[in-house]
Image (cartoon, rainbow, N blue to C red):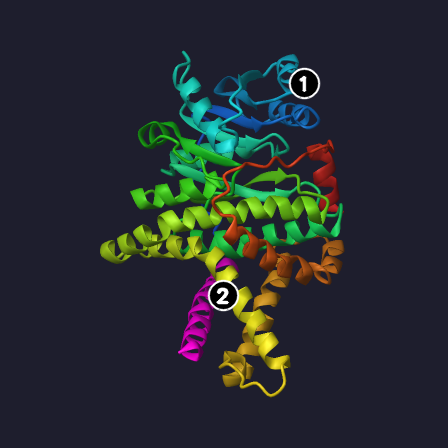
């Protein structure tokens, strides 16, 4: 009985992994024939901030220089339970500081929900809402791309997420490799195939009418994933804009990274538990591969959890003498399994080549497997603590400006 369960789980994991591997091949090409439009959409740019006095000024300065008519966008900073000078800095720089104090409902999702209610009651209304994090930077043409997509019919748009500090440490480089991979071989394939893209927590743009109609309603630890599920369940497919780039600061240390990723996986378990089966059944009922694909994406957290346990069990089983071996796909089809393993790791290298990553990035591929393996214990711990709803703040202390990011990319 146990042998059958283990084998069945291995086959299921192999099928879902193979499905994602096949999808990556549809990210090797990129269409560039989008219809462009003159600036016409107005934007409320919301910046989520909790004690971000060190970095928020650089983002406001960056947003002032956007290549978009200044009368068509305003900047609002959500100063969520701040105890530092964030609000004062925002006001000194000419942006609008919206201060919120609610220690019982902390976190980005709650802050956004509160801010949207404030925004709806203001005299000026906007065509769309952009959401950024305080440590972000955006390319000057960001709003032009959002304007084009909105005019072309998109209601929810995710920008290309890049890394501000890819070479600060082996951890930031691991994040950078992952982001380049996800942009090119997870997001772009879904764009090319007409499937729904997923939101990445920042660089997001929403049609105001849709937000007012749906309400935000995403207050989990991974509000971006939760809102993605709500959109797809409603029949709204988020789209991905490859040209609109947003740069995000990544944690420097393994400890800070593990804390951040633990929060992500705790939230991912929560969202998967609530949305996987309803979305899967809806996809089957409606014959919608978009809904089925999004449900499979939600299931990824369980794929990592189960595959890590099975792999460890099989490893232990192999090294214990005089014990009958459990059935293993590796033993049944070693060539196929080896080819799959090589392709799985090789796709990260392919992503670096396609994205023209700086040459110095390639040396970090040596330590990249350590980063990937570290997801196992993090996910395992997250499974048993998934009911935790305590939001944890990732501290940002280094001021980086767009010119510095672009010069490093060019080098």
User: Considering depth in this image, is 342 or 307 the residue closer to the camera?
Assistant: 307
Give the position of the N terminus as an image quadrant: bottom left
What residue span does the magenta drawing correspond to?
A: 1-28
Tell me the tag on residue 170.
none
| Residue at the farthest left position | 285
User: Quick one: SS at disc 2?
Assistant: helix
Q: Write the residue at 62% across / 39% down.
A: 247
Pair 2/1: label in front: 1
Looking at the image, residue 226 lies above or below residue 375: above
Would residue 90 be seen by someone viewing this image from the given angle? yes
Q: Residue at x 63, y 45 (%)?
A: 259
Circle 1 Cα neighbour tier, 10 Å, few/some/many (<14 / 14–19 / ≥20): few
Residue occupied by mark 2:
21
Name which quarter of the figure residue 157 lies in: top left
Where is residue 36? Give x, y as percent.
Answer: 45, 37
Q: Main secondary structure of the magenta part?
A: helix
């Amino acid at each position: 009985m146990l042998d059958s369960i283990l084998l069945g789980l291995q086959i299921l994991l192999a099928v879902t992994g193979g499905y994602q591997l096949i999808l990556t091949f549809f990210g090797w090409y990129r269409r560039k024939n989008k219809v462009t439009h003159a600036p016409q959409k107005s934007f409320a740019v919301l910046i989520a901030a909790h004690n971000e006095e060190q970095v928020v000024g650089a983002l406001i300065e960056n947003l002032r220089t956007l290549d978009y008519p200044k009368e068509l966008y305003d900047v609002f900073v959500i100063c969520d339970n701040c105890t530092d000078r964030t609000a004062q800095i925002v006001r000194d720089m000419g942006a609008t500081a919206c201060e919120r104090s609610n220690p019982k409902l902390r976190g980005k999702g709650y802050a956004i929900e509160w801010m949207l209610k404030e925004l709806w009651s203001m005299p000026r209304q906007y065509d769309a809402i952009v959401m950024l994090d305080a440590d972000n930077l955006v390319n000057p043409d960001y709003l032009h791309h959002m304007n084009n997509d909105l005019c072309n019919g998109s209601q929810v748009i995710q920008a290309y997420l890049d890394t501000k500090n890819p070479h600060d440490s082996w951890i930031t480089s691991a994040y950078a490799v992952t982001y380049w991979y996800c942009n090119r071989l997870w997001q772009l394939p879904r764009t090319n195939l007409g499937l729904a893209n997923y939101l990445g927590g920042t660089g997001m743009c929403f049609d105001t009418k849709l937000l007012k109609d749906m309400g935000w309603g995403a207050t989990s630890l991974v509000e971006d994933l939760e809102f993605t599920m709500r959109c797809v369940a409603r029949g709204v497919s988020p789209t991905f804009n490859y040209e609109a780039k947003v740069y995000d600061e990544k944690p420097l240390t393994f400890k800070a990274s593990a804390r951040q990723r633990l929060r992500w996986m705790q939230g991912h378990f929560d969202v998967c538990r609530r949305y996987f089966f309803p979305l899967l059944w809806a996809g089957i009922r409606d014959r919608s591969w978009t809904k089925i694909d999004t449900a499979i994406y939600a299931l990824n957290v369980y794929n990592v959890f189960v595959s890590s346990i099975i792999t460890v069990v099989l490893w232990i089983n192999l090294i214990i003498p005089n014990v009958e071996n459990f059935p293993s796909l590796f033993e049944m089809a070693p060539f196929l399994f080896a080819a799959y393993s090589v392709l799985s790791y090789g796709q990260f290298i392919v992503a670096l080549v396609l994205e023209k990553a700086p040459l110095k990035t390639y040396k970090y591929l040596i330590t990249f497997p350590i980063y990937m393996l570290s997801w196992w214990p993090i996910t395992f711990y997250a499974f048993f603590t998934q009911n935790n709803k305590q939001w944890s703040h990732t501290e940002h202390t280094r001021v980086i400006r767009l010119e510095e990011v672009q010069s490093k990319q060019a080098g």
